Image (cartoon, rainbow, N blue to C red):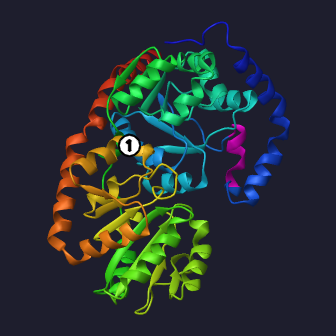
Amino acid sequence: MTAVAEGLPLTLHAYRLLSALAAPFAPLLISHRLKHGKEHPARLDERYGKSKLARPPGAVVWVHGASVGELLAVIPLIERIREKGLAVLCTSGTVTSANVAEQRLPPGAIHQFVALDAPRFVRRFLDHWRPDIAIFVESDLWPNLVMTSAKRGIPLIVVNGRVSERSFNRWRRMPSTIGALLRCFDLCLAQSTAHAGRFRDLGAPRVTTTGNLKLDVPEPPADPEALAALKAAVGERTIIVAASTHAGEETMLIEAHRRLRHSFPRLLTIIAPRHPDRGPGILEIARAADLEARLRSRGELPASLTDIYVADTLGELGLIYRLAPIVFVGGSLASHGGQNPIEAIKLGAAILHGPHVWNFAEIYEALDKSHGAEQVTDVGKLTVKVGAWLKDADERAKVVAAARETVATLGGALDRTIAALEPYLMQIRLEHRDADA
């Protein structure tokens, strides 16, 4: 097991000191976040490392991911760990991820909000839960959380590890800092050879490429009653979906709708923003364009004359994707690095995306190369490609088939990840068996 290296760099000593001094002011931060809907009002104590739940008996596997995307990627992994009879504690940092955890975690897995990264809160969290192993998803590495866990002899493992080029260039300016943190980890399981190389260059001592867990996620679920109601409301209308959109993208999609509705008079565009609280603003953009629009968060279904339906709710992409022959995946025309296309592909949608997809660079590169997705760079190209695919169902079917084949070829990360974790999981099972004996 890797211990915290002696001789921590000055930056980490300073971080520890400043975070300890800032701890008394944590309630001000939490209060501010609560006012903006970024905290769960009934679960604020978890941010201070406290819990109303008891630690389960036996070995506890702690899995931490920053938000929704990381959590969704490891739910199949958590299911595999639970099948081995091990308790799982899952932590994340956002209200939306907590809602997803409630809906999607397997029975027996516990969700908590991650403690704020101040020494006293981290110690309280670790004292209560006493995890036997800590699995960090992708790259959400809080220094106190990492260093304190390592100091206690808890094996630390990164799964689905990624370091974006932007983060890599930033961390290279502080090599001793990131090197000291990464040396706390027993193992880094990277998404790709490119990410593995960045982990090694930054100082991670043991790195293996296992692939991207997001390629192995199952189809997202949909409530049968809600799906039936929405299908009845849209009937035989022509539908396109824009998923996980960011500011600026909705304006382009609404303009594309305006241009397309002359050729497709029964067109319905469904927009599911990445941040649902932006729904009312998108509604106003649509109405300013002289289009009829409705909000799902108000309990409204699209009517026969609805042009834009804003799906500003959480956990319903599985529902929306089941209606869509074409999905534009957002965060890619706006410069946000793109969102995950895999779930839409598995539900049979043809994928369009913008040029800014560095968060999923390898996946989109493979999809574009196999003609399993297509890049559009502006509203004109978006309009032309959507119109062409709506008119040509055979071409759409070829795109979907190519995408599914690409995803299947790139898959297998779940099996490789669980194989890499198995020696650690076996060890903690044996330790608890011997202790119980």
Q: Nearer the viewer, residue 205 or 392?
A: 392
Q: Looking at the picture, how far across and down is residue 358, in whole percent?
A: 44, 44
For image coordinates 45% across by 60% down, the residue present is: 330
The answer to whether residue 32 shows anywhere in this view is: yes
Above/below status of 95 relative to 142? below
Numbered range of the magenta stretch: 42-50
* Residue matched to label 1: 361
Q: Nearer the viewer, residue 415 or 224?
A: 415
Q: Nearer the viewer, residue 249 or 48?
A: 249
Viewport quadrant of the C terminus: top left
Q: Looking at the picture, how far across and down is residue 199, in whole percent?
A: 46, 23
For residue 395, what is the image quadrant?
bottom left
139 left or right, relative to 190: right
Which structural element holds mark 1?
helix
204 left or right, relative to 93: left
Above/below status of 216 relative to 437? below
- Queried whether the magenta region covers residue 248, the answer comes back as no
Q: Looking at the picture, how far across and down is residue 426, in whole percent?
A: 36, 21
The amino acid type, in three-letter code, at marker 1 is Ala
